[in-house]
Image (tube, rainbow, N blue to C red):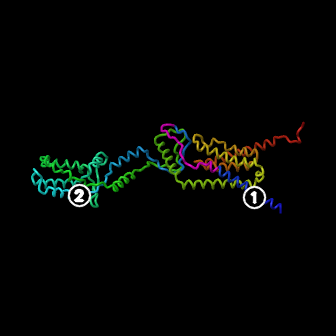
């Protein structure tokens, strides 16, 4: 009974130790993996590209520069026509008020001038009158046309055919009959009968402006996944700069998606966990004795963590490529102190984890796997050669 309890205790201890190794390794590795996609490139036009090669990891549009977009925006807004509501009742009301106020005639002015002025006022209202401030803004702006909404119809009209309250008052006295008696007519305060009958329609105007602005395409091209963006040492042209900046902009936009980031993090945890569980199961099945040697088991897991940390460091420091790391040294170290199969398995697990951080993971996996296999084989041959070359005790002569 005591032996059974001892076996159960040992099994439980082994499970706890191996689970702790897997959890600790997964936690450190996932922490080291780059989760954010923040750009650390500094683009200089006309200078050689000093960072590593960039290949498009996803499809993205080539955005236009802010200067080009502003030029196209100004060009499009020249077609913009603000909307003004036409008040059909305002003109007749003011004309009627003038006729009522001077029903008995204007002092020192012939009686027919009341009818004449009324007709001139009505003509001004038919063209349209707006506030002087709005009129001056339109004249100074790029808009040369406005759209007048009357009932359910909108018609375009040149701003030159519209009057401000000040211009309408001056227009009255361009008539030679009225200008001859201007001094007498000024006593009538005709400006009191000239009020705006055109009011700015903000809702329609803003909608029209936004439609024009939204019609401007923000992109002038498209980069497909896997397409080369720039090589290290290549001179950065204006087009290349726009492509790189578009890539950085799209990268930033994608990194702001919290849901996508959470899914990516969960995927990384699952991926690393599966690899580490498979590695631990391999050791449990074929190299169980290593768990009884703390130094051996520590070296195996430590090498995976160390090379993952170094790879993550080089990924963030884009001046140096990850291929500068001697990944094949790991299986050599393991083969010296352990066996070649474990050395190769450790190397494969390490490479599969490090490949998760690269733009070209398949190329990296193939190259480093072959290198690791060759290193393990070379270390194995050297070990065998050393063993055969060592003199046996039976042939030793003092």
Give SS at disc 2.
helix
Ranked by sequence position, the earlier of labels 1 and 2 is 1
> Is residue 77 or residue 171 the one in the foreground?
171
| Residues shaded magenta | 29-47
Label 1 to label 2, Cα distance in Å?
94 Å
Percent x, y of residue 266: 60, 55
Q: Classify 258 as above or below 51.
A: below
Magenta-span inclusion, residue 375:
no
Does residue 40 appear to the left or right of 5 in the view shown? left
Does residue 183 appear to the left or right of 137 in the view shown? left
Q: Badge 2, how many Cα within 10 Å: few under 14, some, many 20+?
A: some
Name the quarter where the C terminus is drawn.
Answer: top right
Give the farthest residue toward the right.
398
Does residue 391 appear to the left or right of 185 in the view shown? right
Q: Which residue is mark 2?
A: 90
Percent x, y of residue 158: 26, 50
> Is residue 292 or residue 223 the one in the foreground?
292
> Which residue is pictured at 80% across the width and 43% down the height?
387
Q: Of discs 1 and 2, which sits in the foreground?
A: 2
> Which residue is pictured at 38% across the width and 45% down the height?
71
Magenta-span inclusion, residue 34:
yes
Does residue 166 appear to the left or right of 301 in the view shown? left
> Which residue is pictured at 66% across the width and 52% down the height?
26
Query: What's the mark number on residue 350?
Result: none
Q: Which residue is mark 1?
A: 12
> Is residue 181 or residue 232 the one in the foreground?
181
């Amino acid at each position: 009974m005591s032996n059974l309890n001892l076996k159960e205790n040992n099994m439980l201890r082994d499970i706890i130790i191996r689970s702790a190794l897997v959890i600790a390794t997964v936690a450190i590795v996932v922490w080291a993996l780059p989760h954010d996609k923040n750009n650390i490139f500094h683009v200089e036009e006309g200078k050689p590209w000093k960072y590593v090669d960039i290949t498009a990891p996803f499809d993205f549009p080539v955005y236009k520069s802010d200067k080009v977009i502003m030029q196209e925006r100004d060009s499009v807004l020249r077609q913009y026509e603000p909307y003004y509501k036409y008040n059909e009742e305002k003109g007749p009301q003011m004309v009627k008020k003038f006729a009522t106020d001077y029903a008995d005639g204007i002092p020192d002015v012939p009686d027919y001038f009341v009818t004449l002025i009324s007709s001139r006022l009505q003509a001004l209202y038919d063209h349209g009158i707006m506030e002087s401030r709005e009129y001056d803004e339109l004249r100074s702006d790029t808009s040369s046309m406005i759209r007048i909404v009357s009932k359910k119809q909108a018609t375009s009209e040149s701003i030159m055919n519209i009057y401000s309250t000040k211009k309408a008052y001056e227009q009255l006295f361009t008539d030679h009959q009225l200008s001859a008696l201007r001094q007498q007519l000024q006593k009538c305060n005709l400006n009191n009968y000239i009020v705006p009958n055109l009011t700015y329609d903000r809702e329609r105007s803003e909608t029209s402006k936004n439609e024009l602005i939204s019609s401007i395409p923000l992109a002038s091209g498209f980069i497909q996944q896997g397409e080369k963006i720039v090589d290290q040492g290549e001179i950065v042209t204006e087009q290349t700069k726009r492509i790189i900046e578009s890539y950085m902009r799209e990268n930033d936009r994608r990194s702001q998606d919290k849901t996508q980031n959470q899914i990516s993090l969960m995927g990384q945890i699952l991926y690393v966990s599966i690899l580490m569980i498979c590695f631990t199961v391999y050791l449990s099945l074929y190299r169980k004795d290593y768990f009884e040697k703390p130094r051996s088991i520590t070296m195996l897991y430590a090498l995976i963590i160390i090379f993952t940390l170094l790879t993550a460091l080089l990924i963030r420091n884009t001046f140096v490529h990850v291929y500068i790391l001697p990944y094949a040294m790991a299986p050599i170290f393991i083969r010296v102190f352990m066996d070649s199969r474990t050395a190769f398995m450790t190397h494969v697990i390490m490479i599969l984890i490090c490949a998760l951080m690269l733009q070209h993971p398949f190329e990296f996996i193939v190259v480093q796997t072959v290198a690791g296999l060759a290193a393990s084989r070379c270390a194995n041959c050297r070990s065998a050669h050393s063993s055969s070359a060592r003199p046996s005790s039976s042939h030793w002569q003092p």
